[in-house]
Amino acid sequence: MLKWVEGRQNSGYWKMVLLFSKRLQMDIHLLKFEKGVKVPWHKDPAKTGRHFRLNIYLNRPGGGDLKLRGKAIFNNRLFHLFRPDVVEHSMTAVEGGTLYMLSIGKVLK
């Protein structure tokens, strides 16, 4: 059953798990960031392997910009592909309404 649960970092965002597979070593989440929500600087360590994440903005109400302390593999206004286990990252406060993002993660050996 699909339901919203509180996201990590105690920052006020919500996530809905669309896919989680240990066998495939991947996950897909729908993320919801309401006005005023921001995410502090952090890394997302992987227990084994290299963690890759593709974040796709489904709308852009204002703010909610991904910030990286390091290089993205690919980065533009609509999506970001990066290594969250290696690159420290954060998100600026959402300003204009509710932001929705599709987040796809994959761990490679």
Image (tube, helix red, strand yellow):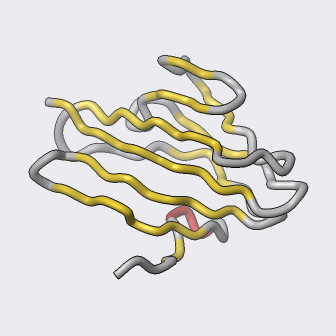
| Image quarter hosting the N terminus | bottom left
105 left or right of 34 in image: left
**Along the line of sight, the residue nearer the viewer: 52 or 19:** 19
107 left or right of 16 in image: left
- Please tell me whether residue 19 is drawn above or below residue 7 in the rendered image: above
Q: Residue at x 65, y 52 (%)?
A: 40
106 left or right of 109 in image: right
Give the percent coordinates (x, y) of residue 9: 55, 62
For residue 49, which quarter of the picture? top left
Total tally of numbered discs in the picture: 0
Q: Residue at x 54, y 46 (%)?
A: 42
For residue 3, which quarter of the picture? bottom left
- Please tell me whether residue 41 is drawn above or below residue 82 in the rendered image: below
Give the percent coordinates (x, y) of residue 57: 64, 43
- Please tell me whether residue 96 is drawn above or below residue 8 in the rendered image: above
Give the percent coordinates (x, y) of residue 95: 88, 55
For residue 11, which quarter of the picture? bottom right
73 left or right of 13 in image: left
| Image quarter hosting the C terminus | top left
